[in-house]
Image (cartoon, rainbow, N blue to C red):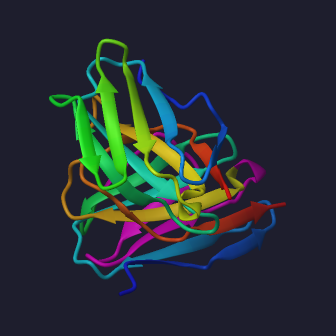
């Protein structure tokens, strides 16, 4: 039972490079999320998708784009990476669209930008 | 103002004793709270939740207490076990969003043998 799968697990980029973080869930969930976690801080929402083809900005969307390819997959793209985007990125999914429903998380992508 | 605060970065407890993790919030419009547990190199996993219409919710060894007047909640773990060593996050749905959670910074719980 895979749940939420994120790839890659680790990545090092140079400033200005682009990259796409992949996320897939096999729980038939409607809602998917991208978060970043920085040291000493809680998770912050980057983007949210309630269903295929729909996305909404979260608390920290600048510098990121997302694509909800289908019900299973939700990708996060950094077009021109900056050192401030060094973080751990988590993808999550939930059955419904309300934030009081438990979210299921992947194991994260640790991204370093030099 | 919408903040969830976990003011203790870490907590060390003897195995078998009670662990109490605290969380404060600033917005009285918050009406639901969730606790997540996170092991190193893994994503958070949902642990327990509580609605603002209740003041207590219990699930096995885990109990969450809510004090609305003080804007405070706490997670009690009894008895504490080595596998409980993890980072615990408190979160609340934002008052002005259907999909955004406001997260605390987390408390690292260390269970000593």
Task: Kindly identify the residue that appears in the image at 46 percent across and 51 percent down.
Answer: B79
Task: Kindly identify the residue that appears in the image at 23 percent across and 70 percent down.
Answer: A29
A72 left or right of A74? left
Q: Is residue A17 above or below residue B93?
A: below
Check the image and name the residue furthest to the front. B16
Q: Is A104 colored magenta in this rendering?
A: no
Quarter holding the C terminus of chain A is bottom right
Task: Kindly identify the residue that appears in the image at 43 percent across and 48 percent down.
Answer: B78
Check the image and name the residue furthest to the top. B69
Q: How many marks?
A: 0
Snapshot quadrant of residue B2: top left
Q: Is A68 colored magenta in this rendering?
A: yes
Snapshot quadrant of residue A24: bottom left
A12 left or right of A88? right
Check the image and name the residue furthest to the bottom. A1
Between A32 and B24, the one nearer to me in the picture:
B24
Check the image and name the residue furthest to the right. A114
Residue A61 in view of the camera:
no
Snapshot quadrant of residue B70: top left
B107 left or right of A100? right
Residue A75 in view of the camera:
yes
Quarter holding the N terminus of chain A is bottom left
What range is drawn magenta here? A55-84
Residue B16 pos. (x, y %): 54, 52
Residue A33 pos. (x, y %): 39, 59
Task: Kindly identify the residue that appears in the image at 29 percent across and 45 percent down.
Answer: B49
Q: Is residue A39 above or below residue B47?
A: above
Residue B5 pos. (x, y %): 52, 28
Q: Is residue B27 above or below residue B21?
A: above
Residue A83 pos. (x, y %): 77, 52
């Amino acid at each position: 039972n895979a749940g939420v799968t994120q790839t890659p697990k680790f990545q090092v980029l140079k400033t200005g490079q682009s990259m796409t973080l992949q996320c897939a869930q096999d729980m038939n969930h409607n809602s998917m999320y991208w978060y970043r976690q920085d040291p000493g801080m809680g998770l912050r929402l980057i983007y949210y998708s309630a269903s295929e083809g729909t996305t909404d900005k979260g608390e920290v969307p600048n510098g990121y784009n997302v694509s909800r390819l289908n019900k299973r997959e939700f990708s996060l793209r950094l077009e021109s990476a900056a050192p401030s985007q060094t973080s751990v990125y988590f993808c999550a999914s939930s059955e419904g669209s309300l934030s009081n429903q438990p979210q299921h998380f992947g194991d994260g992508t640790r991204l370093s930008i030099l | 103002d919408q903040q969830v605060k976990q003011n203790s970065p870490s907590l060390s407890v003897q195995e078998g004793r009670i662990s109490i993790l605290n969380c404060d919030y600033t917005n009285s419009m918050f009406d639901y709270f969730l606790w997540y547990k996170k092991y190193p190199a893994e994503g958070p996993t949902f642990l327990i939740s509580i609605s603002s219409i209740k003041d207590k919710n219990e699930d096995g060894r885990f109990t969450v207490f809510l004090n609305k007047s003080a804007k405070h909640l706490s997670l009690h773990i009894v008895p504490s076990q080595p596998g409980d060593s993890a980072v615990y996050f408190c979160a609340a749905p934002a008052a002005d969003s259907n999909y955004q959670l406001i997260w605390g910074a987390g408390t690292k719980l260390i269970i000593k043998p």
